Amino acid sequence: MKLIAAVDKNWAIGFKDKLLVSIPEDQKHFRNETMGHTVVLGRKTLSGFPGGLPLKGRRNIILSAREDFTARGADIVRSTEELFGLLREIDSDDIYVIGGGSVYKLLEPYADEAIITKIDYSYQADTYFPDLDSKDNWEIVDISEEMTCFSIEYHFVKYRNKNPLEMPL
């Protein structure tokens, strides 16, 4: 299972249910990585997508405890137990966790890889990704050249979890 996100200097990912910044090359990178795969996300993340619709060309699994929540073209799971039950049926290399903050926090210990766009800026934020640099079990295995979008500098960084947890039965 892979985590994929764009983070600022403080590992922030969002503010008021929106992404911090839109970088076209990051969006292209996200699309290329996740197309044809399974994405796991929370209800609030889905609501931030165009039209609040699931991503095309991917299997969307949405974790939401709200019984009245539906999303056409997506699998809805109501609990972590139900989520893990569904994820165990899918090849781990085919799963991408795409947000939000609580879903990243829940699944980070089980992921074996993280694909992070690290933005060299600090934004006002209220939602954060787990700080992989502070965790002993995560290590950087690849980093791109510095890239720029207008005045925003960023890198694509790949992390590996040296000791991911097994999903509970």
Image (spheres, helix red, strand yellow):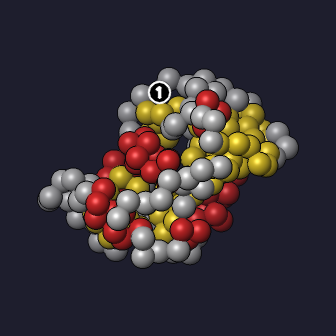
> What is the residue that sits farthest to the right in this orientation?
145
Q: Is residue 39 left or right of residue 122?
A: left
Determine whether 99 is above or below 136 in the image.
below
Name the residue tied to disc 1.
Answer: 125
Residue at horizontal 49%, vertical 69%? 38
Along the viewing direction, whichever of 78 and 165 lies nearer the viewer: 165
**Quarter of the image where one finds residue 15:** top left
**Residue 155 place in picture, x, y as percent:** 75, 41
Residue at horizontal 38%, vertical 42%? 102
Determine whether 17 is above or below 46 in the image.
above
Determine whether 161 is above or below 73 in the image.
above
**Residue 128 place in picture, x, y as percent:** 48, 34
Determine whether 158 is above or below 166 in the image.
above
Q: Amino acid at mark 1?
A: Ala
**Residue 104 place in picture, x, y as percent:** 46, 46
**Quarter of the image where one finds residue 138:** top right
Along the viewing direction, whichever of 152 and 163 lies nearer the viewer: 163
Tell me if I can see residue 47 in this picture. no
Tell me if I can see residue 136 in this picture. yes
**Residue 68 place in picture, x, y as percent:** 14, 59
SS class of the residue under badge 1? Answer: loop
Looking at the rendered image, the quarter that the C terminus falls into is bottom left
> What is the residue that sits farthest to the left in this orientation?
68
Along the viewing direction, whichever of 110 and 131 lies nearer the viewer: 110
Residue at horizontal 58%, vertical 65%? 34
Residue at horizontal 60%, vertical 34%? 135
Within 10 Å of disc 1 (Cα), the crowding (few <14, some 14-19, many 20+) is some
